[in-house]
Image (cartoon, rainbow, N blue to C red):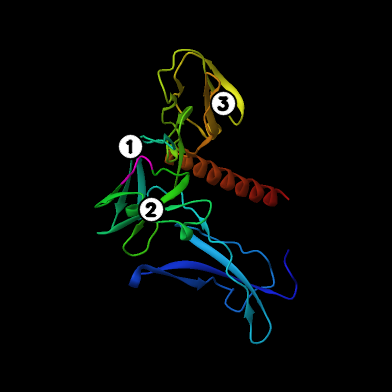
Amino acid sequence: MYHPYFRGYRHRIHRKIIHHLYKYESLPGSISGMEKNSYIILGQTHTSGYVCRAGRGNPVHFTDYSELVFAWSGDFHSTASLTVSPNSVQHFFYDSVSLNCSGNSSQWTVMKFTQHGYLREHPQCGKWGMMTESTCNIYRHRYQDAVYCCEAESGQLSNGVNITARVTGVILVSPVHPVNEGDSVALGCKFRTGNLNSTITFYKNGKLIQNDDRKNLNIPAVSKSDEGFYKCGYSGHESPESWMSVKASRSSLSVSLITGLVSGISLILLLSLLLCCW
């Protein structure tokens, strides 16, 4: 609960290149503290980590920093980006998975962020995989449910990528990154110990949408309405849910913009005509 006698201080973490350490930077308007217990971030363009702490008195006595929380950028076309091979959110524990960094950097670091906080874990690829230039190959026995990202030499962080690991049962094969509106997408169901040869079920947002012997859920041309949580089931097993994000195409954005402009101009002309008649 927020105490009225405390002032809140919000900070964003930044990479300090020397010694590979991190430092805190006060957010605008938070240097001297704030009486509000919330802070709105406007124009988030890349992945950043945030912490807060409270303080009171003069001189100010501070509490410890809060747990580190990241606001993840989903922009696949940012200055730093991460791709996964095979292209799926979910993987079995002994699958071969590679994480590839791309962008304007001569040196890359691949890190993982678990629900317990990466600062308490071994954050870098060399502790749970093999780093070769810009690619991290995860050791088969070192999988962990986590968010993975690339860090450029400058400290710029890439988009965050969720990876879910399962030892047995079934997994949903679904794209890691947002898919473009109008693209065809096939979601698959994969069984750990054999082939799928009977009824396979697919769910969207908890509702059954396909129940037959097809191994894939095919969507010929995805739209925003296809966005949601998906999972599959087979022989008494169910996969975890994965979110499929759909990105609006430029053509649909252009149409929306043109439609808005035409509507606005028409309204102005109509109002002008009414004023003239009045």
Q: Which mark is residue 203?
A: 3
Residue mark closest to the camera, 1 vs 2 = 1
**Disc 3 element:** strand
Other-residue count near label 1 (Cα within 10 Å), few / some / many at <14 / 14–19 / ≥20: some
**Mark before the other along the chain sequence, 3 or 1:** 1
Q: Is residue 51 magenta?
A: no
Q: Is residue 229 above or below residue 196?
A: below
Residue drawn where x is 65% and y is 63% of the image: 38
> What x and y, as percent, mark residue 85?
33, 38
Kindly identify the amino acid type of the residue bearing the numbered disc 3: Tyr
Residue drawn where x is 36% and y is 68% of the image: 20
Q: Is residue 21 above or below residue 235?
A: below
Identify the residue at the far front of this view.
141
Residue drawn where x is 57% and y is 21% of the image: 209
Write the start and end of the magenta stretch as one range. 137-141
**Disc 1 element:** loop
Compute the Cα span from label 3 to label 2. Answer: 32 Å
Give the residue pinned by disc 1.
Answer: 96
**Disc 2 element:** loop
Kindly identify the amino acid type of the residue bearing the numbered disc 2: Ser
Compute the Cα span from label 3 to label 1. Answer: 27 Å
**Mark before the other along the chain sequence, 1 or 2:** 2
